[in-house]
Image: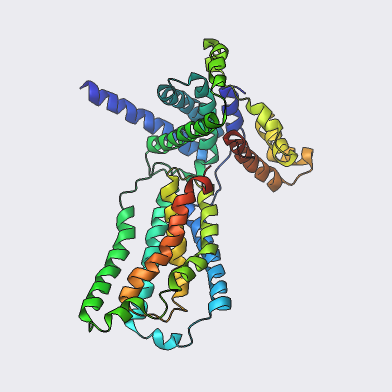
């Protein structure tokens, strides 16, 4: 086929574009994925029994705020990385901002605490399982978000895979907050982040094969 | 002075192409065809400069990039410079091609490359080596027929639906999926 023939084939009957916007696609993907993660959490882990009391503590909302802002930061990154040639200048800020904010709170709590309490603040009761459970809960969001991303046009596949993984990890962490008994800022700043970085690394590592279009 | 003139020229061209694309995205197929035609000339120049040692690949890659621009045109944001969007797609397809070739060469006898010398002639350079018609023929009917009827024979979606016995939405979906499958076949997937 000659290039001119291809062009006329592509243009013939092309019509107005009616595809949903990238934001709407991601919103739907996150909603479905989060529902999947919630279902997994309820069946395998259960909601923490004292959730109503925990919700009265400021630290609970600091924790939720951290993962939710990281989720919106990585959604911003995913949106930018799904569009060829889009500028990435605010992407590092959107991702690093919540992390540094959390670390500042964690450092303050850590050094403010009695030295004997510090190891408890950092390890809590559940450090062994927390990162793995967050990674497990991220699976449904990871799948739906990658599918959306592949339908768009990421051109930097490793970075895009990283953003998709981080987004799924952060959404999973929001869901995990409803189960997790930990309230130590140093715990959240390290083990939660580690859990979210598991899908992010998988995304970065396999981005080139997952997302090729 | 000369430099500012050139910059003004780029900007004028960018604005004109962008206007054509935006009109195309809104449903003006004539403007869209003009856009693709002008774009193909720019893509050819861009890729030829970067594929000096692989002149035979240029036209194939022009076609692959055009198909990518078409399939992914919903990702264009009119607030964004068109040149940045197009260039990112072309560069992505270029890198993909080079990666594909590198993988291919690792698996194949390097002697092949030497024999290629005789098949390279200047007259071929303007022709695409890969025949999209053949790839098109390999698509399943529910994708191939909608493309053939609406995009090659120029029938309307309604006419194509009556002719094939498919629903109108199935025809539209078939075109969309078929062009995506065509791009996948070019990449060597499936």
Q: Residue at x 63, y 28 (%)?
A: B132
**Is residue A177 left or right of B121 when viewed as pictured?**
left
**Is residue B23 left or right of B147 when viewed as pictured?**
left
Q: Please tell me whether residue B150 is drawn above or below residue B119 in the rendered image.
A: below
Q: Is residue B32 visible?
A: no
Where, quadrant-wise, is the N terminus of chain B in this rendering? top left
On the image, the x and y values in percent for residue B40 come to 48, 26
Where, quadrant-wise, is the C terminus of chain B in this rendering? top right
Indicate the colouring scheme. rainbow
On the image, the x and y values in percent for residue B75 come to 48, 45
Q: Is residue A111 visible?
A: yes
Asked where in the image residue A180 lies, by quadrant, the reply is bottom left
**Is residue A34 left or right of B153 when viewed as pictured?**
left
Depth order, front residue of B68/B76: B68
Q: Residue at x 55, y 64 (%)?
A: A32
Q: Residue at x 43, y 69 (%)?
A: A131
On the image, the x and y values in percent for residue A61 come to 36, 77
Depth order, front residue of B134/A161: A161
Q: Residue at x 52, y 31 (%)?
A: B106
**Is residue B140 left or right of B181 when viewed as pictured?**
right
On the image, the x and y values in percent for residue B176 come to 62, 42
């Amino acid at each position: 086929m000659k290039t001119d023939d291809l062009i006329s084939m592509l243009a013939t009957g092309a019509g107005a574009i009616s595809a949903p916007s990238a934001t709407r696609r991601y919103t739907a993907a996150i909603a479905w994925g989060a529902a999947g993660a919630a279902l997994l959490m309820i069946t395998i882990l259960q909601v923490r029994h004292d959730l109503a009391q925990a919700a009265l503590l400021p630290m609970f909302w600091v924790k939720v705020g951290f993962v939710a802002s990281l989720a919106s930061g990585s959604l911003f990154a995913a949106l930018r990385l799904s569009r060829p040639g889009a500028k990435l200048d605010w992407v590092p800020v959107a991702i690093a901002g919540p992390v540094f904010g959390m670390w500042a709170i964690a450092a303050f709590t850590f050094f403010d605490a009695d030295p004997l309490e510090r190891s408890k603040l950092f390890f809590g009761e559940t450090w062994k399982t927390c990162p793995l459970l967050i990674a497990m809960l991220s699976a449904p969001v990871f799948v739906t978000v990658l599918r959306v991303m592949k339908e768009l046009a990421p051109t930097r596949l490793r970075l895009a895979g990283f953003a998709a993984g981080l987004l799924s990890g952060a959404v999973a962490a929001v869901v995990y907050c409803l189960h997790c008994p930990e309230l130590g800022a140093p715990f959240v700043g390290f083990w939660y982040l580690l859990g979210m970085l598991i899908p992010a690394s998988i995304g970065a590592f396999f981005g080139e094969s997952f997302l090729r279009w | 002075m000369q430099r500012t003139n050139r910059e003004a020229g780029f900007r004028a061209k960018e604005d004109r192409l962008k206007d054509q694309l935006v009109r195309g995205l809104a449903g003006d197929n004539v403007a869209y065809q003009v856009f693709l035609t002008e774009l193909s000339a720019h893509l050819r120049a861009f890729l030829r400069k970067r594929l000096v040692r692989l002149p035979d690949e240029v036209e194939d890659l022009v076609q692959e990039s055009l198909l990518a621009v078409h399939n992914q045109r919903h990702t264009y944001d009119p607030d964004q410079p068109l040149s940045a969007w197009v260039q990112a797609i072309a560069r992505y397809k270029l890198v993909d091609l080079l990666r594909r070739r590198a993988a291919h060469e690792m698996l194949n006898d390097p002697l092949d490359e030497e024999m290629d010398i005789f098949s390279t002639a200047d007259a071929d350079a303007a022709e695409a080596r890969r025949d999209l018609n053949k790839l098109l023929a390999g698509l399943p009917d529910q994708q191939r027929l909608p493309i053939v009827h609406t995009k090659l024979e120029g029938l309307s979606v309604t006419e194509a639906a009556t002719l094939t016995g498919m629903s109108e939405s199935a025809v539209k979906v078939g075109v969309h999926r078929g062009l995506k499958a065509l791009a996948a076949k070019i990449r060597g997937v499936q």
